[in-house]
Image (cartoon, grey):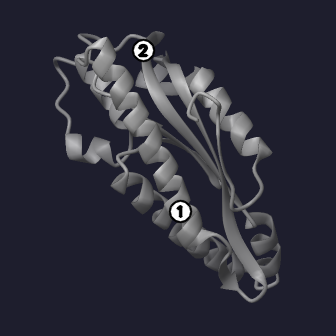
Amino acid sequence: MSNLKVDLNSLKSLLPKAVIDFALDQNELNPPLQQTFDTVALFADVSGFTKLSEALASKGPQGAEELAFFLNRYMEQLVRHIAKAGGDIFKFAGDAMLVLWIPDKSLSESDLIKELHIMAHRATQCSLSIQAEMNKAEFTKGVTLSVKIGIGYGKATVLHVGGVYGRVEYFACGKPLLEAFHSEERATPGDVIVSSKVW
């Protein structure tokens, strides 16, 4: 990225730190590229969104605006908890989000393991705080939003693909994400389920 001048503060509001750091470390960003790191992954999926949409649909365009407003407020509170715990929001997917805690790559093997354990603890504490404050949040009479959370741990890979028209997309994959997804699938609204590696 030698010839590219970027406003890092603007990028930080659009891209995860892991992607920005990787891009800045590259002399040239010619996909496909791959980065691998150990991480703690959290997957959170909001429950009650469909019921809320149905309840507000009868209001027409005003209902759609209210739906966006309520979901944005709920997500803002999730983001506040995650940022406080040091998580990096990797992707939003509708009413769900993927969050990663990525240790500094310069750590020794023993320090890396210690840091990952601390990050797993932070992710779990963050999740419990979210559930304590935000479970069954009522936005309109009789309709609540809750969240299901799963947490995984291990080595992840981020694939940087594209390059056509100067566009690059990034995708995360790997065991910690699968563990987080599978844990979330087993959860009911208000639950935090961690994989055996996190436990």
Say which element carries label 1.
helix
Q: Position of residue 157 (x, y in %)?
A: 51, 17
For the residues labelled 1 and 2, say whether their Cβ atoms are less than 8 Å apart: no
> How far apart, in angstroms, are the residues tagged by discs 1 and 2?
30 Å
* Residue 75 visible within the image: no
Residue 6 lies in quadrant: top left
- Of marks 1 and 2, which one's residue comes earlier in the chain? 2
Q: Position of residue 98 (x, y in %)?
A: 55, 41
Which residue position is annotated with label 2? 35
- At x 19%, y 41%, the residue is 7
User: Please, what is the three-letter code of the amino acid marked with disc 1?
Assistant: Ile
Q: Nearer the viewer, residue 2 or 187?
A: 187
How would you rate the neighbour count of disc 2 (Cα within 10 Å): few for under 14, some for 14-19, many for 20 or more? few
The image shows residue 97, relative to residue 73, as above or below, that is above
Q: Position of residue 78 (x, y in %)?
A: 50, 60
Residue 167 lies in quadrant: top left
The image shows residue 17, relative to residue 39, as above or below, that is below
Q: How many marks?
A: 2
How would you rate the neighbour count of disc 1 (Cα within 10 Å): few for under 14, some for 14-19, many for 20 or more? many
- At x 28%, y 11%, the residue is 28
Which residue position is annotated with label 1? 130
Residue 65 relative to residue 9: left or right: right
Residue 10 relative to residue 45: left or right: left
Q: Position of residue 126 (x, y in %)?
A: 47, 54
- At x 59%, y 74%, the residue is 70
